[in-house]
Amino acid sequence: MSSEPARSGRLSRRRLFGLGAAGAAVAGAGAVAAGPLLREPPVAHASSTSDPYPFYGEHQAGIVTPAQDRLHFVAFDVTTRDRAELVDLLQEWTAAAARLTQGKESGSFGAVGGDPAAAPDDTGEALGLPASGLTLTIGFGPSLFDDRFGLAAERPAALADLPKFPGEQLIPEISGGDICVQACAHDPQVAVHAIRNLARIGFGRVSVRWSQLGFGRTSSTSRAQATPRNLMGFKDGTNNLKLEDAALLRQQLWADAADGPAWMAGGAYLVTRKIRMTIETWDRTSLTEQEQIFGRDKGEGAPLGKKHEFDALDFAARRPDGQPYIAARSHVRLAHPSSHGEARLLRRGYNFVDGSDGLGRLDAGLFFIAYQRDPRKQFVPIQMELARHDPLNEYVKHVSSGLFACPPGVRDAGDYWGRALFE
Amino acid sequence: MSSEPARSGRLSRRRLFGLGAAGAAVAGAGAVAAGPLLREPPVAHASSTSDPYPFYGEHQAGIVTPAQDRLHFVAFDVTTRDRAELVDLLQEWTAAAARLTQGKESGSFGAVGGDPAAAPDDTGEALGLPASGLTLTIGFGPSLFDDRFGLAAERPAALADLPKFPGEQLIPEISGGDICVQACAHDPQVAVHAIRNLARIGFGRVSVRWSQLGFGRTSSTSRAQATPRNLMGFKDGTNNLKLEDAALLRQQLWADAADGPAWMAGGAYLVTRKIRMTIETWDRTSLTEQEQIFGRDKGEGAPLGKKHEFDALDFAARRPDGQPYIAARSHVRLAHPSSHGEARLLRRGYNFVDGSDGLGRLDAGLFFIAYQRDPRKQFVPIQMELARHDPLNEYVKHVSSGLFACPPGVRDAGDYWGRALFE
């Protein structure tokens, strides 16, 4: 038995898998028939966390912040050509974000508030709702550094345009953007309210290029969080960079002054990819094939050949028949840091379902979000390897792409998003 | 003062409105500057309710069930022409729904489960998640009663096609459908998982015609729930039919045997409307105009001229200048039961944001859901009045429409969705 942990483990887990695993009562019933319990604690998707996160700090919140359950991500085109207007907007947005993230409305005290003949200075749909863990994180796209605002010399080398990856089918209308804002919260109404009010404040200076809602965070960014599942049903982000990894975060996540430019010290680079999954095809694939494609088992999330989710990946381990437990062309192996000079990403993506696709299928997948110190050394080589060889490519299609430089945190009420870039 | 409650009330509420109202600390700070507090309790949007609702019963769950916070609604086209296959599917779906709503996976015990060479009998993304209050509610559209399945004689008179309403701009691809399923839960991953697995089970017999995600329930269906807000920022559903209104529910919601046909006794009729809001235009409208359009104040939700949300509407009350507090062409007055022979609806709609519209705006609005005993006497006359005269029409557009007969509840494990229709 002990020489074949995958096989025996799989069978018992499989029984539980077919049997359901929500709550002790169910697991208890299963134990009689199926042996070992699935001891996974419930994932706190429906968390009632209502407290605010601090807005001011060395780094922007919403990066290593324990991933909240809901997302509203927006990319704006800047429509003004006036640099001063853009700076004014960033100052107004920062003031609004400082309020919104603390559970307050977007308007400032008494500014427009007293006059019922004026439009309200907040749209109102979050009145009475708590902060809900809202974070707002801003990023600047490559296009912001064109000739409109005199920023060309400040464009970071790490903000190099992404190469074309094999197989991607990007839709320009839902890719790119001059400025992005990522709103994460435990309540979608709070996240939507925040983005909507930033768009309202920006009227006449920016327009919404694209936006994306997401649910069910598909990575943990803290060891205090259980690993959630993506829409392929697999745990996602087991070996993600996490906020407790202080040394790795300094090495892999935060840009420092030596990286240049100076205004990005303490910031990070963000890559977004909207990855459409053909879930109907996936759902007709055998469990064995699904597990071999990922390199992990589906129930527990353990590396094939191991028993537990957090057991170390061992690419040398072989089954009794001499074949490796984890195939050379499995997702976990192709994406593993050991295949890319130890390059890692801090992922905090979300599942999405955008209605149906008009062909009788759900329009569903993963909105991939990854933060890092230098996409040229991290996202690009990892994704190039996956785009070329990942067996998952049969079931996924990249349809949108975004790249943004996320500046450091706002230090205090006298500071604003991107000040060091403009002053 | 007491002769002008609206004016004095509005000013103090307006101050609070501009000031933010999330939590006691904020309200306390506001009290110094602005007088009366906004005493609204936080709406439990991020409820952590994880318990299951019973699946079996006289009526289907998901109608008077206290409205959960998240929605995944799907409309299917039946692609088989074989009545027996359709009946098989309804039986399989019922068995899966009985399991899913109790927090179990969709597969039956051991059916496909033992064979790793087979596709898993559940897609897996809800493994480890609790029941999260999931309800699944089925309805049959008018098109199911065409000549394919021999059901024409069983079509209820109350399932008469809706008339064309002035101003509607329906998109056929996201309207109608042979069968709908409404999944409501406190966790979107649980609602999406349920719909996806029903679609998976239906492969080859049904295809997804359209689907819609929603958040932030826009009506309460129980007096135990606080009234939530729609994306216009107003409380919505203050005077909704609620599960505590037993006599009204018998009169207004549940079809009985005398209504005919017999198979619908204990069921209800469902109307869905996807209502796109031009929120950017709305957000530039003055508070006074917004409140006059609705006929309620925005902060508290009180009828204009009154102080509290649940104060009775008084259309005869007049301001000192002789004008009615609530205009004849206000939304609350046009929709009020007194304007429609006391006809009422049980609404349980959801807010939606479907990305952006390609024109620089969020694609946002209300997915309206209303249950009733007879749409010919309830939804149709109410909506005809609104479509003709509601000043809100300047800010909304109906883009999808659905009409479904929702059969009574499944009595026990030997019963199935719609059995009385087919046997």
Image (cartoon, coloured by chain):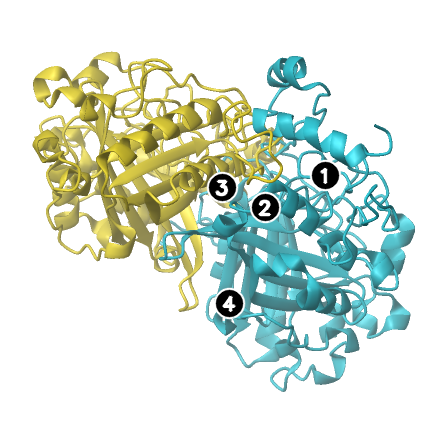
Chain colours: A yellow, B cyan
Q: Are marks 3 and 4 in contact (CB under 8 Å)?
A: no
Q: Nearer the viewer, mark 3 or mark 4?
A: 4
Mark 4 vs 1, N-terminal side: 4
Mark 3 vs 1, N-terminal side: 3
Q: Are marks 2 and 4 in contact (CB under 8 Å)?
A: no
The quadrant where residue B329 appears: bottom right
Discs 3 and 1 lie in a common subunit: yes
- In the image, residue B101 lies at what x, y percent? 63, 46
Residue carrying label 4: B174
- In the image, residue B172 lies at what x, y percent? 51, 73
Which label number is shown at residue B126? Answer: 3
Mark 2 vs 3, N-terminal side: 3
- The answer for which chain carries disc 3 is B
Residue in the image at 73% along x and 36% along y: B225
Residue carrying label 1: B301
- The answer for which chain carries disc 1 is B
Q: Residues within 10 Å of mark 2 (few under 14, many from 20)?
A: many
Which label number is shown at residue A345? Answer: none
Whether residue B194 is visible to the viewer of this picture, yes or no, is yes
